[in-house]
Image (cartoon, rainbow, N blue to C red):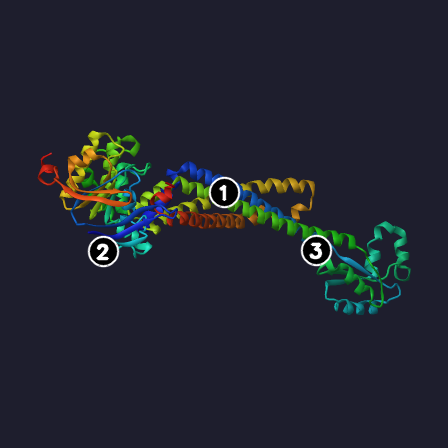
Amino acid sequence: MIYLENISKVYSNGTQALKNISLNIDDGEFVFIVGPSGAGKSTFLKLLIREEKASSGKIKVGSYDLMKIRRGKIPYLRRKMGIVFQDFRLIAKMNVYDNVAFAMRVTGSPERIIKKRVKEVLRLVGLEGKEKRKPNEISGGEQQRVSLARALVNQPDMIIADEPTGNIDPELSFDIMKLLVEINNTGTTVIIVTHEHDLVKEFGGRIITIDDGEIKSDQKYPARYHKTEANKT
Amino acid sequence: MKIFYLIKEGFKNIWTNRMMSLASVVVLVSCLIITGAASLISLNVTTLISKISDDDQITVYLDYDLNDLKSIKLGSQLSKISNIESYSFYSRDDAIKQYEEILGNIYESMQDDGNPFGNAYKVKLADLSEYQSTVEEIKKIEGVSSVSDRSDIAGKLTKLNYFVTIVGSWVVLILAIVTLFIISNTIKMTMYSRRYEISIMKSVGATNAFIRVPFIIEAMVIGLVSGLAAAGVICGVYMPVRTAAASIIGFIAESTFTVDQLMLPIFAVMSAVGVLIGLIGGSISIARYLNKEGGEIIGW
């Protein structure tokens, strides 16, 4: 569960990115964070993954109190979440298999378990047979699938996706979103930051609008592809 | 933590980033060669000077009418002068014997009472820089007639030794600082080119130690390879240079170190310095990135 109470973030240059934000995200929720550029969406994500520390307020992710967490514990917090970036952030010198396996090696998993699990997630994201390809040898959509597979491989409690469809074609965007829905259907919390309103309307769920560092709305819409719908497609 | 995996990653990184590794090796080898050569020249010149100084003895001439017994007794007064390292008696008979061949027929007539030389002492000083004051002290001893004046050579040798030691130390020190500066920039450049990778590692939950170990292994291996290569070049060049110098100035051959004497220390010191530079440079440079997060690492 994610819990924020009166969270504010002021950067060292004086910019106030978030103002007194309070919200709860329960386990297993499917949440869109929307808003214009510079609204504070990215800062919100950075606070969740503890890339930034809030200036004031309370913020908890699972059992971690992010206002008090020690630097050495941050990697363990991040292992509880899978992060998907707009620019994929794959390591160019590693092939598809190693890019995914890498996230498990970091945790010290045995190679035997890594092999089995990486094979499973690559099948799940539809990249079977492309294990040996380097990132520059596959399409943007496929690169985002690798990024998704890497986020999933440690069976995280939540997936945090920052504009996951920002760098890919609309058709492929739809596929990526469907994958995220499928992941959510297994009980994983999914938080997506996006400005693509069409996709938000299409997929529904909880939609939190942030503007000028404040929550302007927090509403639930019919989740069209969730549960049974996702299984049909 | 899987230490073998991390060590393997360190070695793999060298090959994967081979152009950067090669650039680092070239820079490191060049710097180590220059610093190593300067140290070697300084060491050899110092040895050469000290060898020349060793051969530098002064002669203390005694009064002509001082008999052998009194002359030998005078030695005990020489031993009281602290700057005298050693002395040996040089009798009037030894002195005339030197000229036996030149004198030919008249040599016999110059024995005993006919000997124009007095007794003498060959004296070696501990510190040449105190030459003048020691000579003054010797001159005060009753029975001493004169002292061979080599103050000019003594002064020059002292100055040269001082110059080589001071200048050599400064040259090596300056080169070492320049080397560290160049190497630290090379490592910074390597880290900069890998900052994206570091940010990804952090985002998937890698601990600082997990990120740090392969980088440091990589830097140490590059340091070791560079140290060995530099030592190889120095040893390879040293031998012909020494031979060439010896063909011009003969005593260089006896007064400088041979390659066999230096090879082991050169390889040991160069490898150790290379590994140490890798360890320190790598640790400092990676620490800069480990204290940052995400976009901050990449510079967004």
| Image position of B122 (left or right of A160) | right
**Distance (Cα) linking label 3 and label 1:** 38 Å
Instruction: Say yes or no: labels 3 and 2 on the same chain.
Output: no
Q: Element at badge 3?
A: helix
Image height check: is B58 above or below B290? Answer: below
Foreground: B34 or B140? B34
Please provide percent x and percent y for residue B244.
64, 39
Determine whether label 3 and label 2 are within 8 Å by CB: no
Q: Considering only order in the chain, which callout, 1 or 3, is on the residue closer to the N terminus?
A: 1
| Image position of A102 (left or right of B113) | left
Look at 74% across and 67% down and name the residue there.
B79
Which residue bears the numbered disc 2?
Answer: A63
| Image position of B132 (left or right of B15) | right
Which residue bears the numbered disc 3?
Answer: B54
Foreground: B198 or A34? A34
Disc number for residue B28: 1
* Mark in front: 2 vs 1: 2
**Distance (Cα) linking label 3 and label 2:** 78 Å
Please provide percent x and percent y for residue B82.
72, 66
- For the C terminus of chain A, the quadrant is top left
Q: Element at badge 1?
A: helix
Please provide percent x and percent y for residue B234.
55, 43
